[in-house]
Image (tube, helix red, strand yellow):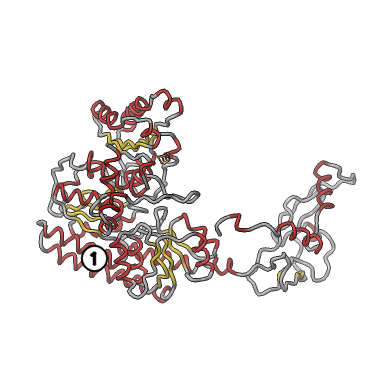
Amino acid sequence: MLKDKVKALFEEPACGKNQAKSEKDRKAGCSKPLTPGAAAGGCAFDGAKIALQPVTDAAHLIHGPLACEGNSWDNRGSGSSGSDLWRRSFTTDLTELDIVTGTGEKKLYKAIREITQRFSPAAVFVYATCVTALIGDDIDAVCKAAAAKYGVPVIPVQSAGFVGSKNLGNKIAGQALLDHVIGTVEPDDVGPTDVVILGEFNLAGEFWQVKPLLDRLGIKVRACVPGDARYAEIAAAHTARATMVVCSTALVGLARQMQERWGIPYFEGSFYGVLDTSESLRQMAKLLVARGAPADLIDRTEALVAEEEARAFARLEPYKARLAGKRVLLNTGGVKSWSVVAALMEVGMDIVGTSVKKSTAEDRERIKILMREDPHMFESMAPRDLYRMLADGEADIMLSGGRTQFIALKARTPWLDINQERVHPYGGYDGMVELVKQIDIALHNPIWTQVRTPAPWDADGYLIETVVSFPATDAPSPLPGGERSRPQRAGEGVPTLERDVPPHPAPSAPTSPHRGEVMEVGATATVHQLPSTAEPDVSFAARHRKKFAESRVENSDPDYLARHRKKFKTTDADDMGEC
Ligand code: SF4
């Protein structure tokens, strides 16, 4: 049964990739064998959970071993304006004993009972994982029995990790909503301007930058799936007059089936970038008017677009001079591969490459239209190539997800998170201004000048053209009575590197003064005065200090360096990692 469901999801006719495939290739699916050792990007369970977890007033129960769930709190930055039940997640924590004795179903039933009694959720989503699918737990039957007993919707999600990738998991989640949720509630406030937004995750609360625009137009968001969604809103989503699909690879199948089942037309759009936000608002208004909304909605939309575009461009103007011509490497995918490209081109930035890893055929076409002369698209780039490109200065900044941030930082290149862990909202007109502001901050952060300055030593550890001098100091000693720790010679003081480099911190002073010793560091140093004793110090610590002092090797000793260079000569630095 699960096999048939997965097969049907692979054959999604609305999927851009599928449309370009032959009948035979479509049936073969989209999964590619994973590279051992590479980050696979999540299993089907992960994908299903990502697509459903932002439903805020529902409980999310993972039926499987503890490790499948891991830490659910804030693993994605979706914002909620209500309940925070969605963030905590629950698991049946299946153990070997449960698996051997076959008590998984019983444990699941008890877990649903406990959750409904303790947390009173609007619904419970139950996720299958590899282990529970392999041992044959019938989660459909358990969910049905628990829903009847406790009077709460309990939705089974057939998301065993082994069925495929994270993207397939998104589709499985959409199918679960269609099979068990949408159409189960009939609202009494249906209107001609109701819309459903699919694939909007409200990351960092960015949908809250768009919703006020819709409110001004009188467009009612019947349900935003899944960002900041309530279960009852999704259950009534079939009454909407139009659907907008934001992340087309995730829930386009759901949009297509809503059109077939309830006649709700859909379009694919984006709220990233000034012009894309305007275009999405226009398309939404057009679809709604075609389905019975007041005709003046189109004119009101044009007026709002004109006002907001003027305001956004005025706010972007100061950044154009600072960012024009700066080269951006975009390592993301999906709808962002083109919508962010469009947004950055609006301020005159150059796109030196954009990843089209999860992009559909339409996404690629849009990139080609936007970057007419040279689209610079790449499917995926190995970390080593990414590093080389950044280290060679082929891009001034990389925009990507957290997984590749250290490649940019290692190459001493500015980086900005535009994936799910981001903390700044980039949606709508205000979001575009925020994105450009954050790029400006990242690019012009003074840290880059400092980390790119060559170190004051060479590959062998010798100081380069460095003179260490001790400038004379006439500053009064902070010590009691003006005394100094030892007689100071002319020209002696805090060591200074006489080079044309930004100042490095002075060598730190010992933090643990020896017995009877006075430590003096600049004018603000703390004075440690331990009682002096005429007896020689024979303590354990003193003996070890002496031992280490005698065994210390002067690292400028040429013999010592020659011996060690020979020893490490055969070590391949590449063994340490990709870059
Ligand atoms: S692949 Fe299977 S076992 Fe691993 S996290 Fe996903 S569901 Fe759990």
Q: Quadrant of the N terminus?
A: top left
Q: Secondary structure at mark 1?
A: helix
**Which residue of the protein is positioned furthest toward the top in this rendering?**
101
Q: Could you say which quadrant of the image residue 521 lies in?
A: bottom right
Depth order, front residue of 201/294: 201
Task: State the residue position of label 1.
Answer: 279
Left or right? Give the position of 38 relative to 520: left
Q: Could you say which quadrant of the image residue 325 lies in?
A: bottom left
Depth order, front residue of 230/457: 457
Left or right? Give the position of 423 relative to 566: left
Depth order, front residue of 461/206: 461
Left or right? Give the position of 35 relative to 251: right
Quarter of the rendered structure image containing ligand 1: top left
Q: Could you say which quadrant of the image residue 4 lies in?
A: top left
Dot 1 amino acid type: Glu
| Residue under the image location 50 percent in, 49 percent down | 37
